[in-house]
Amino acid sequence: QVQLVESGGGLVQAGDSLRLSCTASGRTFSIYRMGWFRRAPGQEREFVASITWSGGLIYYADFVRGRFTISRDKSKNTVYLQMNSLKPEDTAVYYCAAARGPGASSSTADYAYWGQGTQVTVSS
């Protein structure tokens, strides 16, 4: 079992920045990839970014490239999502997730563990 806890969300204005963090506990040795997803009001959960734990291989959704940066601190079992130039359409609940194997990085089905989410609200 792996437990994930997100933090760092909040209410900001368009153009501002936030950094989300996600700390994993439990059987963290089993984690192959960690990712961020988001769910906007009335929409499906969508992929944001992911990073492999050992090699640091990163994938981004097209709509966040150049604005968001994913990183990890292996010693702290923590993954971060630095979000710059935030837009109102970035408003969503952001979820941290962990995968145990090399599945599709953007597929929710390939992530076995999920955090409870942290709310990000961007006003215009």
Image (cartoon, rainbow, N blue to C red):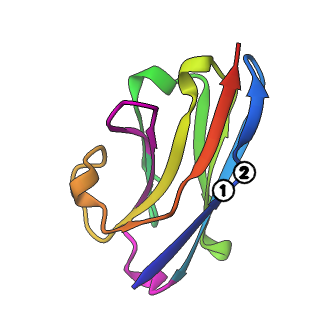
Callout 2, which amino acid?
Gly
Give the alpha-carbon distance from disc 2 to disc 1, as whole Å: 6 Å
Callout 2: helix, strand or loop? Answer: loop
Camera-side mark, 2 or 1: 2
Q: Which residue is mark 1?
A: 21
Out of 58 and 44, give the one closest to the viewer.
44
Mark 2 touching mark 1, by CB under 8 A?
A: yes
Position of 104 relative to 53 (above/below)? above
Q: Measured from the top left, where is residue 16 in percent x and y?
A: 78, 24
**Residue sitting at x 67%, y 40%:** 82
- Residue 81: image quadrant is top right
**Residue sitting at x 63%, y 18%:** 87
Callout 1, which amino acid?
Ser
- Residue 76: image quadrant is bottom right
How many residues crowd around disc 1 within 10 Å: few (fewer than 14), some, or many (20 or more)? many
Q: Measured from the top left, where is residue 120 in percent x and y?
A: 64, 38
Indicate yes or no whether the magenta region holds residue 39.
yes
Span of residues in magenta: 26-49
**Residue sitting at x 72%, y 51%:** 8
Residue 8 is marked as: 2
Q: Measured from the top left, where is residue 18 in percent x and y?
A: 74, 38
Position of 113 relative to 92 (above/below)? below
Q: Measured from the top left, where is residue 61 in percent x and y?
A: 40, 30
How many residues crowd around disc 2 within 10 Å: few (fewer than 14), some, or many (20 or more)? some
Position of 10 with respect to 91 (left or right) is right
Quadrant housing the N terminus: bottom left
**Residue sitting at x 67%, y 49%:** 20
Callout 1: helix, strand or loop? Answer: strand
Position of 32 relative to 28 (above/below)? above
